[in-house]
C-alpha cells in the first residue's frame, strides 16, 4: 500500500470523539468547543460521546466501536486512550489520539503531538498505520502494567483524594502511606520460553512505552520498538529499600543491575500464590486472576499519524 492509499480521508468519514467529563467540567466544555471549531467542520459527520465517570469509559468505547464509525478519537489521558484502544483492537477501525492527560506516553510514542491542538493538526492531515499493543489476561494496555506496590499506591491515592482533594502533595503523601502499609512481598513464578524463574519482590513493572522508559533513564526502549515488552522486577522486597529505589529512579540514578532484574520478551506468564490480585494498567486498576498471561499483540490497532511522517513530539 503506497502513501496515497494510507492517507485518511476525513472529509467523507463518520467520526466519533470519546472523552471523560470526570476530569473536570470546565475543561470538558473547553475541549468540546475546540473540537467543534477546529475538527468537526472537516469531517463528513462528527459526534461526541462523553462518559460521566472514568469507570464508564470501557463500555462507552465498546458501544461506539459497534456503531459503524470510520474513525474513533480518544480525547484525554492514557487511561482514556487505553479504554478506546481496547475497544478498537482487532476491528480495523482507525483510532485518533488527542492527548489531554499529564504524561501522554502513548501520544508521545506515536509522535502525534503533546497537546490536543497538536493532535488535531495530526488528524486533519493524517496517514494510517498499525501499532502493537500489550495484553494481560484479555485486557489491553498501552504503556504499562504493574503488580505489587504501585496498584496499592493508586488505591490509597483515591482515598486520600476523596478526603483531602486532588493535589500534588496528596499524590506524594499517598506513596508514603501505601509503602508504609506494605507488609508482605510477592512470591512470583515467571515463565518465559518454557523456563521458570522465581522472585520475591514488592513490585513488578511491565513496560510497553519506549518513551516512558527513556524518561525514567532505563534500558529497553529499543526492544519495545522492536515489538517486545520489558519486564522489571524490583529486587527490593520491603518498603524502605523499594522507596530508595524509587528515589534513585526519580533522580535519574537508577541502575538496572542494582534495582531491578530485567526480562525482555514478547510473551510471558507470572503466577502468584494469591488467586486474584490488583493490577495497575495505564493509571487504572483492575483485579485479575493469577496466573497473569502477558503478550504483545502485533499490529493490533490502526492509528492516525502525521501524513508527512514527522514526529510531532520531537519536531
Image (cartoon, grey):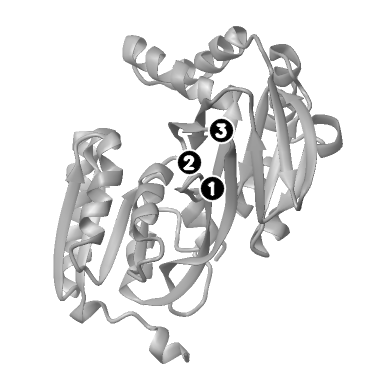
Tell me if mark 1 has few (under 14), some (14-19) or many (20+) residues whose alpha carbon lies within 10 angstroms of its own: many
In which image quadrant can residue 298 be found?
bottom right
Name the spot of residue 148 as percent of width and height, x first. Answer: 60, 25
Q: Which percent across, then down, holds residue 51?
A: 21, 41
Q: Residue at x 43, y 78 (%)?
A: 307
Q: Residues within 10 Å of mark 3 (few under 14, many from 20)?
A: some
x and y percent of residue 91 in the render? 35, 67
Q: Quadrant of the C terminus?
A: bottom right
SS at mark 3 in the image:
loop
On the question of residue 268 being in view, the answer is: yes
> In the drawing, does residue 129 fall left or right of residue 266?
left
Nearer to me, 157 or 55:
55
Q: Which mark is residue 143?
A: 1
Q: Is residue 254 visible?
A: no
Q: Earlier in the sequence, mark 1 or mark 3?
A: 1
Q: Is residue 181 above or below residue 133?
A: above
Asked whether disc 2 touches disc 1, contact meaning CB atoms under 8 Å apart, the reply is yes
Which label's residue is closer to the chain start, 2 or 1?
1
Residue 204: percent from left, percent from top: 66, 33
Amino acid at each position: 500500500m503506497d502513501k496515497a492509499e494510507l492517507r485518511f480521508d476525513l472529509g467523507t468519514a463518520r467520526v466519533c470523539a470519546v472523552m471523560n467529563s470526570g476530569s473536570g467540567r470546565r475543561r470538558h466544555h473547553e475541549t468540546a468547543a475546540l473540537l467543534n471549531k477546529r475538527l468537526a467542520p472537516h469531517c463528513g459527520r462528527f459526534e461526541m460521546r462523553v462518559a460521566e465517570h472514568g469507570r464508564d469509559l470501557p463500555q462507552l468505547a465498546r458501544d461506539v466501536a459497534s456503531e459503524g464509525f470510520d474513525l474513533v478519537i480518544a480525547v484525554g489521558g492514557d487511561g482514556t486512550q487505553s479504554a478506546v484502544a481496547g475497544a478498537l483492537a482487532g476491528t480495523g477501525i482507525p483510532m485518533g489520539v488527542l492527548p489531554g492527560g499529564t504524561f501522554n506516553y502513548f501520544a508521545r510514542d506515536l509522535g502525534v503531538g503533546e497537546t490536543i491542538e497538536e493532535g488535531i493538526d495530526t488528524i486533519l492531515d493524517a496517514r494510517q498505520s498499525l501499532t502493537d499493543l500489550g495484553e494481560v489476561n484479555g485486557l489491553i494496555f498501552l504503556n504499562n502494567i504493574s503488580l505489587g506496590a504501585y496498584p496499592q499506591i493508586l488505591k490509597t491515592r483515591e482515598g486520600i483524594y476523596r478526603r483531602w482533594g486532588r493535589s500534588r502533595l496528596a499524590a506524594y503523601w499517598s506513596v508514603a502511606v501505601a509503602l508504609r502499609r506494605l507488609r508482605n512481598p510477592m512470591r512470583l513464578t515467571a515463565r518465559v520460553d518454557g523456563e521458570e524463574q522465581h522472585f520475591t519482590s514488592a513490585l513488578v513493572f511491565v513496560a510497553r512505552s519506549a518513551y516512558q522508559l527513556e524518561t525514567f533513564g532505563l534500558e529497553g526502549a529499543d526492544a519495545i520498538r522492536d515489538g517486545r515488552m520489558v519486564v522489571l522486577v524490583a529486587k527490593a522486597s520491603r518498603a524502605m529499600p523499594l522507596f530508595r529505589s524509587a528515589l534513585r529512579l526519580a533522580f535519574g540514578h537508577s541502575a538496572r543491575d542494582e534495582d531491578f532484574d530485567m526480562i525482555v520478551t514478547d510473551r510471558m506468564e507470572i503466577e502468584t500464590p494469591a488467586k486474584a490480585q490488583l493490577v495497575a494498567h495505564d493509571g487504572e486498576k483492575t483485579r485479575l486472576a493469577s496466573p497473569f498471561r502477558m503478550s504483545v499483540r502485533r499490529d493490533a490497532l490502526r492509528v492516525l499519524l502525521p501524513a508527512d511522517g514527522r514526529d510531532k513530539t520531537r519536531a
